[in-house]
Image (tube, rainbow, N blue to C red):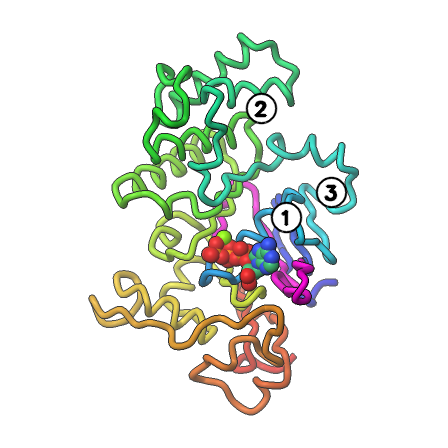
């Protein structure tokens, strides 16, 4: 298997995803949403997953806890958490893994709370279900968690509608942390929030990381927030990972033409002219019928002879750097 994708060389690997494939089996045909996706996340590492809307980020997130909504189906690959393949577990075994070993802060999380229960009860419920803790103990933990995420324990009896969007988002973060899992997946956790609250949530994640030493998969299409927070980044395009590398390398020296365009579109961090926003021309393909060869070739300013018929394999170009592009050899 080694040499067949971006597989880890380090020995502190927490999560290893190999050749993940997920489809949405619709009445119009099969949407090839996630195709041959491989990456790993180390212990205490913050790992970013970036790419334009529709490139498959959320589908990867939900696959990792085996909760891809229908008609989605995981049809191939391995998801190794501490070496154990989650795709081989029974539903009952998987239920024990969720929240305790890996939890998800869902996209638009602030709307995911149940309106008829207090936030304290909702956090306590997750604790009681997994740890068989009595209610008063679980509520005491919920209070601690509400303090931890900056909502404050006095909100334990509040209903979701009594909280601001930012506070609700923090409650969802508290729930994701309730059982202290080693891996948290945050799917666009700040996108719906104003910039001040966004910055506060990013700081909260940094504090939590120092405190608990957990790993995080941080998903966003907003590269600025990502660059501030994560150690390594995987760039996705049309269901595939096109590049993986350390954050500073992705910012200073992006290799894949798609990554180059994405980084240039963020003038504050990229080498693009200050204040000049460059859109990426065209739009991502319909994954019911992805383009042949490299999926990015119809939009790629650097395409050449093999790109429209040969799919580039992801190859290692440097320590910790992987890219899937014919410019970097045809393997
Ligand atoms: N229920 C569904 N039925 C059919 N296709 C779907 C369904 N859900 C997602 N898809 C398709 O799967 C692909 C990946 O979607 P996904 O939601 O994972 O993307 P994303 O990167 O999270 O996008 P965003 O940034 O908008 O959240 C898209 O092409 C989308 O159209
Ligand atoms: Mg999404």
What crowding class fits label 3: few (fewer than 14 Cα within 10 Å), some (14-19), or many (20 or more)?
Answer: few
Instruction: Please state the extent of the stretch shown in magenta in the rendering.
Output: 22-48
The N terminus sits in image quarter: bottom right
The residue that appears at 52% across and 36% down in the rendered structure is 214
**Image quadrant assignment for residue 102:** top right
Residue 190 lies, with reference to residue 209, above or below; the image says below
Q: Picture coordinates of residue 137 (x, y %)?
A: 54, 10
The residue that appears at 42% across and 83% down in the rendered structure is 301
The dot on residue 126 is 2
**Residue 174: in magenta span:** no
Q: Is residue 60 toward the left or the right of residue 111 in the image?
A: right
Spatial separation of the CA atoms under disc 1 and disc 3: 19 Å
| Mark 1 or mark 2, whichever is nearer to me | 1
Spatial separation of the CA atoms under disc 2 and disc 3: 23 Å
**Residue 25: in magenta span:** yes
Which circle's residue, 1 or 2, is located before the other in the chain? 1
Is residue 49 at least partly visible in the picture? Answer: no
Which circle's residue, 2 or 3, is located before the other in the chain? 3
| Mark 2 or mark 3, whichever is nearer to me | 2
Per the image, label 2 sits on a secondary structure element best described as helix
Dominant secondary structure of the residues highlighted in magenta in the image: strand
Residue 328 lies, with reference to residue 267, above or below; the image says below
The dot on residue 68 is 1
Circle 3 sits on which residue?
Answer: 84
What crowding class fits label 2: few (fewer than 14 Cα within 10 Å), some (14-19), or many (20 or more)?
Answer: many
Residue 49 lies, with reference to residue 65, above or below; the image says below
Per the image, label 1 sits on a secondary structure element best described as loop
Which circle's residue, 1 or 3, is located before the other in the chain? 1
């Amino acid at each position: 298997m080694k040499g067949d994708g971006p597989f880890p060389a380090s020995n502190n690997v927490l999560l290893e995803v190999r050749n993940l494939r997920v489809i949405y089996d619709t009445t119009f045909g099969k949407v090839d949403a996630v195709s041959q996706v491989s990456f790993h996340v180390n212990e205490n590492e913050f790992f970013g997953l970036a790419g334009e809307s529709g490139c498959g980020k959320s589908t990867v997130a939900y696959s990792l806890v085996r909760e891809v909504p229908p008609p989605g189906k995981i049809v191939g690959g391995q998801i190794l958490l501490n070496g154990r393949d989650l795709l081989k577990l029974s539903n009952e075994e998987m239920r024990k893994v969720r929240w305790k070993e890996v939890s998800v802060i869902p996209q638009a999380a602030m709307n995911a709370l149940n309106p008829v229960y207090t936030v304290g009860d909702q956090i306590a419920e997750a604790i009681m279900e997994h740890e068989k803790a009595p209610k008063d103990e679980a509520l005491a933990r919920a209070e601690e968690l509400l303090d931890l995420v900056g909502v404050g324990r006095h909100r334990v009896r509040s209903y979701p509608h009594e909280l601001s969007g930012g506070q609700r988002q923090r409650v969802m973060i508290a729930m994701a942390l309730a059982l202290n899992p080693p891996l948290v997946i945050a799917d666009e956790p700040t996108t719906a929030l104003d910039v001040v609250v966004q910055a506060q949530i990013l700081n909260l994640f940094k504090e939590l990381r120092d405190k608990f030493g957990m790993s995080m998969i941080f998903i966003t299409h907003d590269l600025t927030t990502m660059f501030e927070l994560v150690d390594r980044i995987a760039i996705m395009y049309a269901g595939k990972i096109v590049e993986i590398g350390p954050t500073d390398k992705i910012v200073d020296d992006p290799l894949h033409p798609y990554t180059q365009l994405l980084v240039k579109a963020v003038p504050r961090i990229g080498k693009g002219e200050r204040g000049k926003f460059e859109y990426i021309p065209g739009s991502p393909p319909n994954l019911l019928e992805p383009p042949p060869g490299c999926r990015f070739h119809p939009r790629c300013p650097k395409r050449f002879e093999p790109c429209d018929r040969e799919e580039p394999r992801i190859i290692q170009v440097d320590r910790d750097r992987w890219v899937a592009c014919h410019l970097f050899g045809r393997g």
